[in-house]
């Protein structure tokens, strides 16, 4: 075998080995990939804030103390609203469920709704079917204390879910700490390795991906929090039951484009079933206007300008990312679309050979 043939074979074997090791490592860390992705997203989204935070420290161990303290702040900022909102939401949800179960009766639908052809009869049948066993369910709920096995099973399931989410959260913060601690080395090494593997043009691609993630965090999270807070005020103003629960759900659903109407539409139906037609119309109009402004002006402006993406690709990236990767896909999807669009623009701009 000639020397060039040996060299080519060695290169093929080397890349095959590298690919196998990468796949093996990904398979081994599959349960921690979500935590790693969240850490990368948080590190990129907070990079400018961390620069200012790092400037407050001095001395040989400044990187350690800055990374440790800032990671703790990020953990507090993330966990405190989640815990508080979760406690309030669970308490209000349980109160709402118990109120319907113990009442043993279906909610009264307004006459104007029942008089709609076809729709009125369908709604009457659905509500009657849904609540026909409410009295039996209320009696069963009163007998639950005598069945500790059900409490044990419910506690076990909830405990497993909480433990899984807590472990992901802890590993996310742990990874985030080391990313902050070794940020200068990562900034230097990642582009260097990428250039060796894919050439010098990949550096602009990495910058575009980072900008897309940062813009998506601003456009998704901040806009969703604002929508939830505003709608919580609307719910409270019109006298809707459990406004904090509804506002929290609205903010959570607002992270997915065009999903918020599921919540404020349900709230409007609930108010309409209680005879508060004006309040229901106010909720629908307020939610629709807020959703239209947020999804058609504010969010595309923030994400599109930061990621250099048309709104259609932003929307497809968010929805496709959620479908493929779960909640973290909200941020990874637009980043991937930004990389693809950047590649496309680079190929289009390249002069023909």
Image (tube, rainbow, N blue to C red):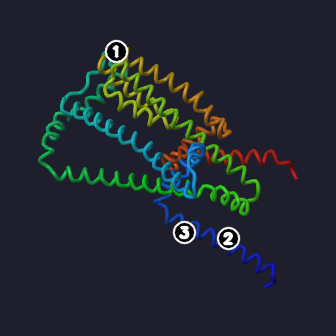
Between the C-alphas of marks 3 and 2, the distance is 14 Å
Indicate left or right for 22 with 264 as reference.
right
Residue ID for mark 2: 15
In percent of the image, x 27 and y 54: which residue is there? 156
Q: Nearer the viewer, residue 127 or 252?
A: 252
Between the C-alphas of marks 2 and 1, the distance is 70 Å
Estimate the x, y position of residue 61 in percent, counting from the top left. 55, 57
In percent of the image, x 51 and y 32: which residue is there? 258
The furthest residue to the bottom: 1
Estimate the x, y position of residue 256 in percent, counting from the top left. 50, 37
The furthest residue to the front: 59
Task: Tell which tag, 2 or 1, sits nearer the viewer.
Answer: 2
Q: Are marks 2 and 1 in contact (CB under 8 Å)?
A: no
Q: Nearer the viewer, residue 31 or 213?
A: 213
Mark 2 lies on a secondary structure that is: helix
Label 1 crowd bin: few (<14), some (14–19), many (20+), radius 10 Å: few
In percent of the image, x 58 and y 40: which residue is there? 216
Label 2 crowd bin: few (<14), some (14–19), many (20+), radius 10 Å: few
Between the C-alphas of marks 1 and 3, the distance is 62 Å
Indicate left or right for 232 with 206 as reference.
left
Q: Are marks 3 and 2 in contact (CB under 8 Å)?
A: no
In the rendered structure, which disc, 3 or 2, sits on the residue that comes first in sequence?
2
Quarter of the image for the N terminus: give it: bottom right
Q: Nearer the viewer, residue 111 or 349?
A: 349
Label 3 crowd bin: few (<14), some (14–19), many (20+), radius 10 Å: few
- Specify whether residue 179 is in view: no
């Amino acid at each position: 075998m000639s020397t060039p043939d040996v060299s080519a074979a060695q290169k093929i074997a080397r890349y095959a080995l590298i690919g196998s090791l990468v796949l093996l490592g990904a398979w081994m860390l599959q349960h921690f990939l979500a935590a790693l992705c969240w850490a990368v997203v948080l590190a990129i989204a907070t990079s400018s804030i961390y620069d200012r935070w790092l400037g407050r420290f001095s001395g040989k161990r400044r990187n350690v103390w800055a990374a440790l303290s800032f990671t703790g702040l990020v953990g507090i900022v993330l966990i405190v609203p989640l815990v508080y909102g979760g406690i309030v939401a669970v308490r209000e949800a349980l109160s709402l469920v118990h109120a319907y179960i113990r009442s043993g009766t279906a909610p009264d639908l307004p006459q104007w709704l029942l008089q709609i052809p076809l729709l009125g009869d369908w709604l009457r049948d659905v509500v009657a079917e849904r609540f026909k066993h409410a009295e039996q369910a209320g009696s069963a709920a009163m007998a639950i204390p005598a069945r500790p096995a059900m409490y044990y099973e419910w506690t076990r399931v909830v405990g497993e879910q909480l433990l899984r989410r807590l472990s992901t959260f802890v590993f996310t913060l742990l990874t985030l700490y080391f990313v902050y601690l070794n940020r200068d080395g990562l900034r230097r090494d990642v582009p260097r390795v990428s250039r060796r593997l894919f050439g010098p043009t990949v550096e602009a691609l990495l910058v575009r991906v980072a900008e897309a993630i940062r813009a998506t965090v601003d456009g998704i999270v901040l806009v969703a929090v604002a929508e939830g807070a505003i709608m919580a005020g609307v719910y409270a103003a019109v006298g809707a039951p459990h406004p904090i629960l509804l506002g929290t759900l609205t903010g959570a659903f607002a992270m997915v484009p065009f999903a918020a109407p599921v919540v404020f539409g349900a709230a409007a139906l609930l108010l309409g079933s209680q005879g508060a037609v004006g309040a229901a119309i106010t909720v629908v109009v307020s939610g629709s206007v807020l959703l239209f402004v947020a999804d058609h002006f504010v969010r595309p402006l923030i994400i599109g300008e930061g990621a250099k993406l048309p709104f259609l690709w932003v929307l497809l990236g968010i929805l496709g990312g959620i479908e493929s990767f779960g909640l973290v896909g909200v941020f990874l999807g637009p980043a991937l679309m930004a990389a693809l669009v950047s590649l496309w623009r680079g190929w289009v701009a390249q002069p023909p050979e």
